[in-house]
Image (spheres, rainbow, N blue to C red):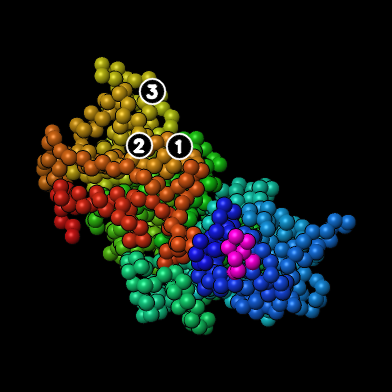
């Protein structure tokens, strides 16, 4: 085994990682290791040689940071420090002693427990026993910093004080968007929003006596608005980055690999910007004020957000969390940068919250963003075209269509009027009120204040008028978007046929429709002998409904259970599709794609509606024989447990993209050239050869 691999050899099969540490830090530690079979290292704190086990690797790396980055003297750092629990004594992994009381722990660091909850429980007991106000847990991949506010609550803090600072310095420092870019937990601490919500549930939410979904949604909504208010600072940072390395935060159109700029180099440049160049301090922060003062500040910010982005929460909506619970939640969320190009972060959190409700039981799950991007790339939406998702969920397909049309990712930069015109040609419909509100939030921001996300039952179109004409609150919230939808109807006062260019959807495929009235609205609701069926799969009706939304020559991507392509009993469905549209492609998704919710094997079906009349839409002349693009994903981006699999470097560390976010490893598309050419790129090459109408003129 070569010397550069010694750390990976030690960590093999352990639950420890090295993601938090830079290559320079790893190399310094490697150079101190002696031997391979029983590797030893001289410990500067203990002042002797010790055996380098997995937990010791992490301890040595973090201790080196304490000495260099935080500038602590070795006399203030102790390993395996004794903590008294009555007659029982335990040993804390790393302790930083109080500079004024050299026998008293000031900060306690836990590295022996590689799982956060285990480590946090251990830290809580140590802090309560010693009175230490600060605690840190890390396993080398993730890290958490806490202020022990009282024996009941650990409040997260941005970082620990260095040797010359106090806890008050950390809590009261002026914190701007620049600081958020530098200290974003998603990159700096390798955490996800879902991880933090799970921790909050354990800390305060589970016993808070509130609707967890509603309170967390309000917090995320308010946090997004706080970042939105710092748009001028964002533009200033981007001007600096364009000048220095020809890139911007969260708005890059080229891969960083092609221009030599990665997340760390972006971060280094942002760190050089003087603090006084930033106009605005972030408001969504716990800055050491009383809990009641903090709640008043956050409620005021929430009220302003509701005025900016109406139609998601009622005007009189307030936080139901207690003052102390809200303070813990704000502390946990304040260092996450939500405005970024990777909406998977928000999706993961909301999918977890919604799945605790009825959403999962209806067989509808949020579509992974890499699947969405594959579909958008293959169908190639163009400016001026109308697009809809009829089972929108969190609106991944519409939002990523907006990204494609505008060339912008999820950003708090102002959107020009000419781009808004294209954005308002993108629509979403969903029957679940909670996910519609999530979708409206993302679309309101992506669309800079307006959205066409509607709370409707796509399949029961005959009853749309009941809400659109009689429900005053519904009209106030969705009326303008519904008016834009009505303008696309093929026939006046009829909600069955529309003139959309593109449709992308992942409809619910669990459960059957048995309601006779509803089945009578669909050709696929009847048997071959003309009698209505007793029940029909929900996804089957969505196939027919979606085709009705498309104009002649319109194109569609729809996620379906694999059985629809194979089952003998479903032959009539395949014949129905082939009679109305050209089958462009079938992409088999990995069985892990929708785990942990379901292991159902799925495929994405791509269609283009037959059309011989150019005046009606893009040409797709009906023929009997034609080639079809088939592909099967062999690298789906998730493991058997449904956890994402991330791209790693030669040191086994997860790689960050230029926005500081982990890159899902898959073969569906090339992720802005971070990954090899995938299925989407192969389809595009084929589509140009076949001269498909929506790729024929593309370069």
Where residue 506 sits: x, y (%)?
37, 41
Of circles 2 and 3, which is in front?
2
Along the line of sight, which residue is nearer the eye, 123 or 547?
123
Graded by Cα atoms within 10 Å as few (under 14), some (14 to 19) or many (20 or more), the crowding at tag 2 reads: many
Q: Say if the magenta span includes residue 66.
A: no
Q: Is residue 469 left or right of residue 331?
A: left
Query: Is residue 277 positioned above or below 436 on the image?
Result: below
Residue under numbered circle 2? 560
Along the line of sight, which residue is nearer the eye, 254 or 640?
640
Q: Is residue 646 left or right of residue 505?
A: right
Residue under numbered circle 1? 599
Of circles 3 and 1, which is in front?
1
Residue 248: quarter of image = bottom left
Where residue 626 sits: x, y (%)?
15, 38
Where residue 236 sits: x, y (%)?
42, 77
Measured in 3D between alpha carbons, the distance from the residue under mark 3 to the one under mark 1, in whole angstroms, is 24 Å
Where is the C terminus found, in terms of image quarters?
A: bottom left
Tag 3 and tag 1, C-beta contact below 8 Å: no
Graded by Cα atoms within 10 Å as few (under 14), some (14 to 19) or many (20 or more), the crowding at tag 3 reads: some
Residue 535's disc is: 3
Q: Look at 45% across and 59% down and name the residue there.
A: 648
Q: Earlier in the sequence, mark 2 or mark 1?
A: 2
| Secondary structure predominantly adopted by residues drawn in magenta | loop
**Can see residue 457?**
no
Q: Earlier in the sequence, mark 2 or mark 3?
A: 3
Q: Is residue 218 left or right of residue 381?
A: right
Q: Which residues are magenta?
A: 33-40
Query: Which residue ends up furthest to the right in the rendered image?
Result: 87
Along the line of sight, which residue is nearer the eye, 574 or 93?
93
Measured in 3D between alpha carbons, the distance from the residue under mark 2 to the one under mark 3, in whole angstroms, is 18 Å
Query: What secondary structure is found at the residue carrying circle 1?
Result: loop
**Can see residue 406?**
yes
């Amino acid at each position: 085994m070569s010397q550069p691999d010694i750390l990976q050899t030690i960590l093999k099969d352990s639950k420890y990682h090295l993601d938090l540490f830079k290559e320079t830090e790893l190399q310094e530690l490697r150079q101190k290791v002696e031997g391979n079979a029983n590797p030893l290292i001289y410990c500067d704190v203990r002042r002797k040689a010790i055996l380098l086990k997995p937990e010791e690797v992490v301890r040595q790396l973090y201790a080196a940071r304490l000495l260099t980055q935080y500038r602590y003297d070795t006399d203030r750092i102790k390993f395996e420090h004794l903590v008294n629990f009555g007659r029982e004594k335990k040993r804390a992994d790393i302790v930083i002693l109080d500079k004024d009381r050299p026998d008293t722990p000031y900060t306690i660091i836990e590295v022996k427990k590689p799982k956060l909850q285990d480590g946090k429980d251990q830290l809580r007991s140590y802090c309560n026993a010693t009175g230490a106000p600060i605690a840190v847990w890390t396993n080398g991949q993730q890290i958490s910093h806490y202020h022990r506010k009282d024996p009941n609550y650990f409040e997260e803090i941005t970082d620990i004080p260095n040797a010359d600072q106090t806890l008050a310095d950390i809590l009261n420092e002026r914190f701007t968007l620049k600081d958020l870019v530098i200290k974003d937990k998603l990159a700096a601490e390798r955490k996800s929003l879902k991880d933090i919500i799970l921790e909050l549930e354990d800390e305060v939410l589970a016993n808070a006596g509130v609707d967890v979904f509603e309170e967390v949604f309000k917090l995320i909504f308010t946090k997004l608005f706080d970042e939105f208010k710092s748009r001028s600072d964002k533009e200033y940072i981007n001007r600096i980055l364009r000048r220095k390395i020809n890139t911007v935060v969260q708005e890059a159109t080229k891969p960083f690999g092609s221009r030599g700029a990665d997340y760390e180099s972006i971060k280094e440049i942002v760190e050089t910007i003087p603090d006084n160049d930033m106009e605005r301090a972030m408001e969504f922060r716990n800055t050491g004020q009383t809990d009641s003062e903090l709640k008043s500040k956050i409620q005021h910010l929430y009220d302003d957000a509701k005025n900016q982005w109406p139609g998601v929460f009622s005007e009189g909506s307030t936080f139901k969390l207690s003052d102390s619970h809200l303070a813990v939640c704000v502390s946990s969320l304040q260092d996450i940068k939500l405005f970024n190009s990777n909406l998977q972060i928000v999706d993961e959190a909301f999918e977890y919250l919604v799945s605790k409700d009825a959403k999962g039981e209806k067989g509808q799950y949020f579509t992974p963003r890499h699947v969405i991007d594959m579909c958008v790339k293959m169908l190639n939406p163009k400016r001026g075209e109308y697009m809809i998702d009829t089972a929108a969920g969190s609106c991944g397909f519409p939002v990523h269509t907006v990204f494609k049309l505008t060339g912008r990712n999820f950003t708090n930069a102002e959107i020009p009027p000419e781009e808004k015109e294209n954005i308002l040609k993108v629509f979403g419909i969903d029957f679940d009120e909670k996910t519609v509100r999530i979708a409206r939030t993302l679309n309101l921001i992506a669309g800079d204040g307006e959205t066409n996300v509607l709370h409707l039952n796509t399949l029961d179109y005959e009853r749309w008028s009941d809400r659109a004409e009689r429900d005053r609150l519904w009209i106030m919230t969705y009326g303008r978007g519904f008016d834009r939808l009505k303008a696309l109807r093929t026939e006046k006062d009829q909600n069955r046929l529309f003139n959309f260019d593109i449709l992308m959807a992942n409809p619910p495929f669990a459960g059957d429709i048995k309601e006779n009235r509803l089945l009578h609205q669909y050709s696929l609701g009847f048997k071959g002998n003309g009698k209505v069926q007793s029940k029909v799969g929900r996804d089957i009706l969505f196939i027919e409904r979606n085709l009705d939304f498309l104009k002649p020559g319109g194109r569609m991507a729809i996620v379906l259970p694999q059985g629809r392509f194979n089952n003998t009993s479903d032959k009539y469905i395949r014949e129905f599709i082939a009679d109305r549209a050209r089958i462009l492609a079938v992409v088999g998704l990995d069985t892990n794609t929708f785990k942990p919710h379901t292991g159902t094997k799925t495929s994405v079906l791509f269609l283009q509606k037959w059309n011989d009349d150019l005046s009606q839409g893009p040409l797709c002349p009906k023929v009997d024989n034609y080639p079809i693009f088939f592909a099967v994903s062999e690298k789906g981006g998730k493991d058997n447990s449904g956890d994402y699999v991330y791209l790693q470097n030669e040191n086994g560390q997860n790689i960050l993209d230029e926005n500081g976010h982990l890159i899902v490893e898959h073969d569906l598309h090339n992720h802005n050239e971070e990954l090899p050419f995938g299925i989407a790129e192969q389809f595009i090459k084929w589509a140009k050869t076949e001269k498909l109408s929506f790729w024929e003129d593309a370069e």
